[in-house]
Image: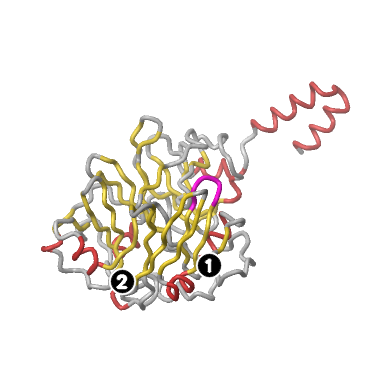
Amino acid sequence: MVALAALLLVGCGGADSAREADRTAASIPSSQEIEFELEGWKTDFAKRSVPLTEFRSGGPPKDGIPPIDRPRFESTAKTTFLEPREPVIELVVRGEARAYPLQILTWHEIVNDTVAAVPVAVTFCPLCNTAIVFDRHVGGRTLSFGTTGKLRHSDLVMYDRQTESWWQQFGGKALVGANTGKRLTQLPAQIVSWGEFERKHPGGLVLTRDSGHDRPYGRNPYAGYDDADSPPIFPTPNLDDDRLPPKERVVFIQRGDESIAVPFSTLAKRRTIEVTVAGDPLVVRYRGGVASALDSESIADGRDVGAAEVLAAGKPVAFAEPFWFAVAAFDPDVRVIR
């Protein structure tokens, strides 16, 4: 009906009427906007960089997967609930090391923390296998994040509590709301085994199960999910990109306008790969002895999928270890390193 009205105005009033019709159409809320507003969102849905139809419910409502806002830590020496091969996110900021076990992140997906005076958001999307840490400073403000309960391309969509803008975890960019177009800074972090973290950082701190929530930590609610040949639960763009199996783990590195994906199957054989991305020489290394968090019902019993690290001039750089389908969805022109 809006389109028909615009055509009638063009016929009767020329270009000026057409422009007025465009403005009128733009001011009419979409069905998605109305739906989201009924859910209680205060987001400015008129400001967005992608269609609202790209968002879908993942099941839980807003903060139905509760973030951890008051994380509690203990020393490595006192930590007894982790097995040696269990995966943890290793974060080192200004010499201060912390471990965030995936057995906890699987149930919360976001930890709002401050490390060495740097506010950080430690995030994990089980559906895409993306463990990414962001600096929470944006435009002079410190944001805190929650889970929207929405997915886009099967990936976690976060929101900041200050403006209720919606942020894509993959890439860290705000897509809807007042912060649309802004991007979070990704910090160097990597998945390592608990045993490796314990050896490397005897004075480090470990996120505890004392989260304020009752969850079966250590259990994997996505048992069997990371079968390499299986498709994601929710449809994603470019799922027919068969350069790699849908859930092949890859090392994804993006620098400027250039990105690469190194399949774990290749990296496990070669162990060390030297690549150049946007003119920067990088070294990608593989190490075994890290359990999958998305394999067996008990995370500690997950099969050995290994992990990676990426270095530039010997120093860690930011990267991620997503499933291939996620990379194909968000960055279809990525260069695959064999």
Q: CA–CA distance between discs 2 and 1?
A: 20 Å
The image quarter in which residue 24 lies: top right
Q: Nearer the viewer, residue 103 or 12?
A: 103
Residue 87 vertical position relative to residue 255 in the rendered view, above or below: below
Residue 42, position as x, y percentages in the image = 46, 36
The kind of secondary structure the magenta stretch mainly shows is strand
How many numbered discs sit on the rendered protein? 2
> In x, y percent, where is residue 92?
26, 51
Q: How is the image coloured?
A: secondary structure
Residue type, mark 1 in image: Pro
* Residue occupying image coordinates x 55% and y 46%: 257
Q: Is residue 54 left or right of residue 142?
A: right
Q: In which quadrant is the C terminus drawn?
A: bottom right
Above or below 20: residue 252: below
- Residue 271, x across and y down, in percent: 40, 71
Lower position in the chain sequence, tag 2 or tag 1: 2
Point out residue 154 in the picture as x, y percentages from the top left corner. 51, 59
Q: Residue at x 79, y 33 (%)?
A: 5
What's the mark number on residue 219? 2
Give neighbour class at mark 1: few <14, some 14-19, many 20+ (Cα, 10 Å): many
Q: Which residues are magenta?
A: 254-258
Q: Nearer the viewer, residue 289 or 234?
A: 289
| Disc 1 target residue | 232
Give the residue type that dot 2 points to.
Answer: Arg
Q: Residue furthest right?
A: 11
